[in-house]
Image: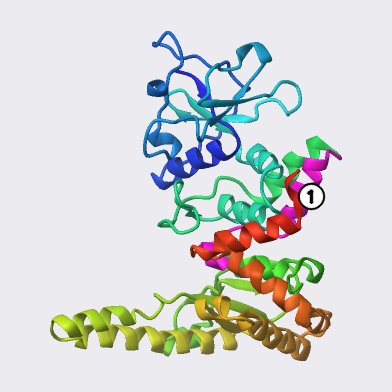
Amino acid sequence: MQLTVDNLSALRALRVFRREGRMLPAERHDLQEPDPSPQQRWTARVIPARRLGLSSAPGTDAPIEVAVPSAEKRLRGAIFSCTVRSTSIPRCSFVSLGDGLSIPCPELLFYELAGTMSQESLALVGYELCGTYVRDPSDPRRGEVVYGAPPVTSVEQIRSYLAAFRDRPQAMLARLALRRVADNAWSPMEAIVALMIRLPVADSGYELGEVVLNVRHSATPELVALGGRGSRVPDIEVVGTHVGFNYDSHLHLDLESIALAAATGSAEAQIAAVRRKHHDDIKRNRELAAMGRVVLSVTSADLFAPGGLDSVMLQAAMTIDELDGGQALANAHAAITPAQREHRQRLIWSLLPWDEGVRFARELAAEQPWYFT
């Protein structure tokens, strides 16, 4: 079999591949003709459903997106949605996932998705492709996330690839989203916070500046000799400032383990573990301060509560203004007008891992149809 899936089908296949801990091959090839061999024709049974993130064989309600090199090679059947890719893309823009299944290279995939996704969703896909986590192929919003996967591309690689498309409208949309992406995100929630920091005020962001993610900072020998960590890694830092952020999820201090242990016996071990983690958080912030870094914590409650992230970002902007100057505070003030706050909160809710996020995403899409033409 030889099959090249495209667009969202390719994104699902790439997520399945990455979740298995596999390295994406460096070799690229041109788009190949589809071939069902050793079968005589294409049927649902030929399709590797599991590798495409499907729980069952594909059906007509959700056809598989396939790329073919010419109109004559289109696959017949209601389970396929075919796109002809001929000379409209750079040579060697596809990559094999093994056993006859190929996808667009991550850089081409980012370009393709610019015609399907909102700017914010596309940017978050960029964080994922350039980061070390992988969303669930079947349920990217609420499904289990896999951490520690190697990145499959970088911001610079995508930027360089997009240059080949010059001023095509879709390439311009892809470049615009890429401006909000940074390499080396370690989690989806961290990526959402970084995106909101980067987004311009006009696009419901805070516009505090460019960010770098998960950069390791070494402690001085005398601090290490006194029991400090050899290094610390803030989740997010605003470039050109002394301010950063750490995202602390509701699992950061595992209070649920205490309740569960208390219900079945003694919770002393769990309480001790939470205390150690809490104490390490305090030490982390002190040690980063000694390195000249003021790191503010962001929690899931800050993201879900109306205006919660506004408060954190205003505090960050005030700190930047005190230590570094610049435009951050002016931008933050512009970002927290009543109209901006209402729209921004709906945007944040649309990106978060909960069922209501789908409703908010649809509402925003209806208000911005030019993103989906």
Residue at the location (73% across, 54% down)? 177
Q: Nearer the viewer, residue 217 or 162?
A: 162
x, y percent for residue 277: 37, 83
Q: Which residues are magenta?
A: 167-190
Residue 170 belongs to magenta span: yes
Q: Is residue 103 left or right of 338 when viewed as pictured?
A: left
x, y percent for residue 133: 48, 56
Task: Kindly tell me whether residue 182 is visible in this rendering.
Answer: no
Q: Quadrant of the N terminus?
A: top left
Q: Which residue is mark 1?
A: 370
x, y percent for residue 271: 27, 87
Residue at the location (64% across, 82% down)? 307
Q: Which amino acid is tagged 1?
A: Trp
x, y percent for residue 131: 55, 55
Q: Is residue 48 left or right of 355 when viewed as pictured?
A: left
Label 1 CA crowd tier, 10 Å (few <14, some 14–19, many 20+): few
